[in-house]
Image (cartoon, rainbow, N blue to C red):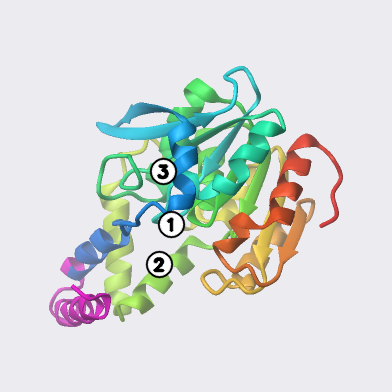
Amino acid sequence: MPMRLFFSGVTFIFKILGAVSPALAGKLALHFFMTPPNSSIPKREVKLREQATLTYLNVRNRKISIRSWGPDNAPTVLLSHGWGGRCTQFYAFITPLVEAGYRVLGFDAPGHGDSSGKQTNILDVASVIAEIAKNEGPFEAIIGHSFGTGTALLAIDKYQVKSKKVILIAYFSDVLWITEIFGELFSLKKSTLAAMRQTALKKFVNTYGVTWKWQELSPIQTIKSVKGEILLIHDNKDHEIPYSRAAALQKVVPQAKLMTTSGYGHRKILMNKNCIETVINFINGEAAEL
């Protein structure tokens, strides 16, 4: 089905259902909100995928794929990918990190890549990171991209995952803003969006072993729990997460190092050589021009 037709159809369903029953519309909205898109593996990632040591971890009856590169006894850097992505999206970072003396550990979130499941959410992925950390932590560094910045921070805040350095690339500050963007995508009524949030609270109140409210999931709150050093990297031409939406996070942690790129957008920033070099220098404890 063409994407335009799909969105038109779903938007029409929400319009009708939202008028009849906001509660039912909220349940349907949550289903779509937690369902990541399918994405093919580009050829540039295949070689590194084949070079990795692949293992699986069972988390709530789902197989979570974990790939590692580099010697087992080296300091570990964990990769936390974005929504609809996979760990090998960091392919340009992996070899340089291994050459710098680190073991690189990447996982595919539930419903992503080689992991099982069809749905997930920010708390779910944070709890997966916590399970990985039980065997592999504490980490020398965690590198998060986009949605993966929120999951990494939530794992640190709610599950006390420890990392000496935290690097956030193409990050966001407010999780409620993410739900609002989703609402705009499908032209949801405010009552439907409110019902979606309430449905999530009720459905997952006991699922992840921690108490939570929506605003508590926001990076602008969770970043306050980070004990290690922080590096923030964002592109001023990012159209998926506008720079203005990232800037709020910078104000909360004025001690963090900040790198601003221009013209690489939301995804190509992961292939930027200056970005990669800055990250490795930061993890190494070396000064770098930002």
Element at label 3: helix
Res. 55 image quadrant? top left
Q: Are marks 1 and 2 in contact (CB under 8 Å)?
A: yes
Q: Of callouts 1 and 3, which one flags the residue occurring earlier in the amino acid sequence?
A: 3
Q: Write down the region rendered in magenta.
A: 1-24
- The image shows residue 128 at horizontal and vertical percentages of 41, 36
Residue carrying label 1: 214
Q: CA distance from mark 1 to mark 3?
A: 15 Å
Element at label 1: helix
The amino acid pointed to by label 1 is Trp
Figure check: 3 above or below 254: below
The residue at the point 35 percent across, 47 percent down is 112
Residue carrying label 2: 179
Q: Of callouts 3 and 2, which one flags the residue occurring earlier in the amino acid sequence?
A: 3
* Quarter the N terminus occupies: bottom left
Res. 131 image quadrant? top left
Left or right: residue 268 versus residue 49 is right
